Amino acid sequence: MIIVLKPNQKQETIKEFIQRLTSQYEVQVNTWVGTHSTVLGLIGDTTGIDSEYVAAQDFVESVKRVQEPYKKANRKFHPDDTVITLPGGQTIGGSSLALIAGPCSVESEEQICQVAQRVKASGATFLRGGAFKPRTSPYAFQGMKAEGLELLREAKKLTGLPIVTEIMSMEHIGLFEDVDIIQVGARNMQNFELLKQLGKLRRPILLKRGLANTIEELLMSAEYIMAEGNEQVILCERGIRTYETMTRNTLDISAVPVIKRLSHLPVVVDPSHASGVNWLIEPLAVAAAAVGADGLIIEVHNDPSHALCDGAQSITPDQFDSLAKKVRKVSQTVCEL
């Protein structure tokens, strides 16, 4: 149930009303103070609450019952967009387009530091890089693991770019203490025990949509994290598996406006994994910016033909520089419309 209060209500009135609800009914009440109104979100068994009685209170603007199973991720509970802000001032969400760039996999200190410097010079605000790599084949390169995380830290010291990297297991959480944004990959989107553990942290989580998951399932996975107290969730559309074989996956570009209509959480797009081929990354990135994505996560490698992981879907630093200029123009134009 969502209760929208009239503007300029006294805090004492609101607190008394919340106490009345929680004492009489088995509900929790979350409060969001927006620009123009205050919203109370009731989570729990609301069947016994008389909507007409609530609406009759002189400080209540409106009352709505919510059918969707996700509550904390629901825009109805949180009308204003969520903006994720890091201690260094970098943001995801709001009016600016966040650019997250770097290699699929960390291969050496020289490689990750060189790429980090180049993408920062082109306007990237976050550094991505895989230390633990989920691979379809057990014989493929699995990443440098803890050593890869250390090399990411060195690149951060050099450039100041916050780190975005993927976690594979609950056992590794201790290794991620100074990772700025923890990524949950498509294969772990419904690893609910991992999501619950990440929900106990107070750091941003970038949650990728699964290969064959619906938008509602993505939002429910976000709910697992948020239900544990961590509301710093970033959603990522990275392509879904369809019958089409011309690309690695099919980028569901419509997912961006759909998710933003349903949820207040920021949405980024990964055209690298969606396409699987480097020549498609730029047009898909431009399309994502055009439909209102809050950010892009792009695979950039200084020598894609010799990359240990996903070289075919990586672009060079020069190509990223060109892409960054185009998507910023598109994003700025969209914001001005």
Image: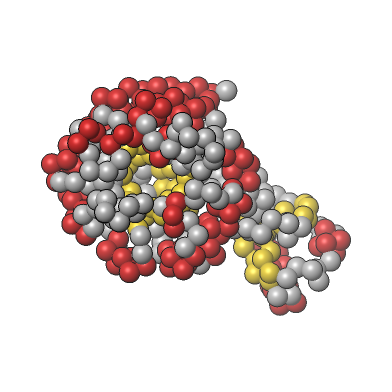
Q: Position of residue 55 (x, y in %)?
A: 82, 58
Question: Horizontally, is 139 left or right of 27 in the view?
Answer: left
Q: Residue at x 46, y 68 (%)?
A: 193
195 or 330: nearer the viewer: 195
The answer to whether any part of residue 256 appears in the image is no
Residue drawn at x 19%, y 36% as measured from the top left: 306
Q: Quadrant of residue 30?
A: bottom right
The residue closer to the viewer here, 22 or 115, is 115
In the rendered image, residue 114, in percent from the top left (x then y), is placed at 17, 37
Quarter the N terminus occupies: bottom right
Q: Is residue 77 left or right of residue 120?
A: right
Image coloring type = secondary structure
Residue with the most extreme left position: 110
* The quadrant where residue 301 appears: top left
Percent of width and height locating residue 326: 40, 22
Compare residues 40 and 1 and report the one nearer the observer: 1
- Above or below residue 194? Residue 290 is above
User: Residue at 36% across / 51% down in the picture?
Assistant: 136
- The answer to whether residue 312 shows anywhere in this view is yes
Task: Give how far across and how far down residue 247 sits, in percent.
Answer: 45, 33
Q: Quadrant of the C terminus?
A: top right
Apparent side of residue 128 relative to residue 59 in the rendered image (left or right): left
